Amino acid sequence: MATWQCVKQCGACCHLDPADRPDLEEYLLPEELGLYLSMVGEDGWCINFDHISRECRIYDQRPRFCRVEVETFQDMYGIEPEELNDFAIDCCRQQIEGVYGDRSLEMLRFDQAVGYIPI
């Protein structure tokens, strides 16, 4: 069984381009939406993402919407705790595919880390 985990130096979730996420207002509170939009750089990437180290500069202080936690996903998306693992894996795979491609090194690293076996 695949088990979700964040893969260091991926950063696909740091690509915040609102054009790729038209439903932001459905799951972010108004103040969160403002913060989210303020974090988007001209290139669509989070201004806190270090492209050289491929890590978040504010990881320990990152906003709620940047966290994969049971309470956050339950509140924002209505995901029950027992569904979080599969939901998070699907979200990451979709984001990685959109940012880097379905045959990218990032996708291969993610699939290997979580134990995902494509059908």
Image (cartoon, rainbow, N blue to C red):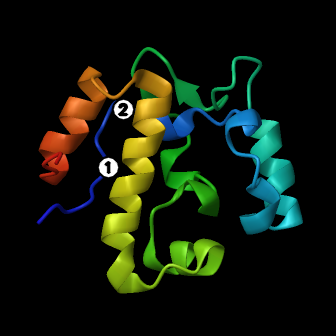
Residue 79 position within the rendered picture, expressed as x and y whole percent measured from the top left: 50, 79
Please give the name of the residue rendered at 28% of the width and 42% of the height, measured from the top-left corner.
7
Describe the element under mark 1 as helix, strand or loop: loop
Residue 119 position (above or below residue 86) = above
42 or 77: which is nearer to us?
A: 77
Question: Circle 2 sits on which residue?
Answer: 10
Work out whether residue 109 or residue 118 is closer to the camera in this orientation and state it: 118
Question: Mark 2 belongs to which amino acid?
Answer: Cys
38 left or right of 116 in image? right
Q: Hey, what amino acid is under mark 1?
A: Cys
As displayed, is residue 54 above or below residue 119? above
Left or right of residue 32, residue 81 in this image: left
**As drawn, is 69 to the left or to the right of 108?**
right
Q: Position of residue 64 (x, y in %)?
A: 61, 63
State which quarter of the image contains the N terminus. bottom left
The answer to the question of whether label 2 and label 1 lie on touching residues, with beta carbons closer than 8 A, is yes
At x 64% / y 32%, what residue is drawn?
A: 46
**Residue at 45% over, 85% down:** 80
Relative to 60, say whether 101 is above or below.
Answer: above
Q: Residue at x 36, y 32 (%)?
A: 10
- Please tell me how crowded label 2 is: few (under 14), some (14-19), or many (20+) other residues with Cα within 10 Å: some
The quadrant in which residue 102 appears is top left
> What separation in Å lies between label 2 and label 1 (alpha carbons)?
8 Å
Visible in this render: residue 88?
A: yes
Residue for badge 1: 6
Q: Secondary structure at mark 2?
A: loop
Residue 88, picture quadrant: bottom left
Residue 15 position within the rendered picture, expressed as x and y whole percent measured from the top left = 58, 32
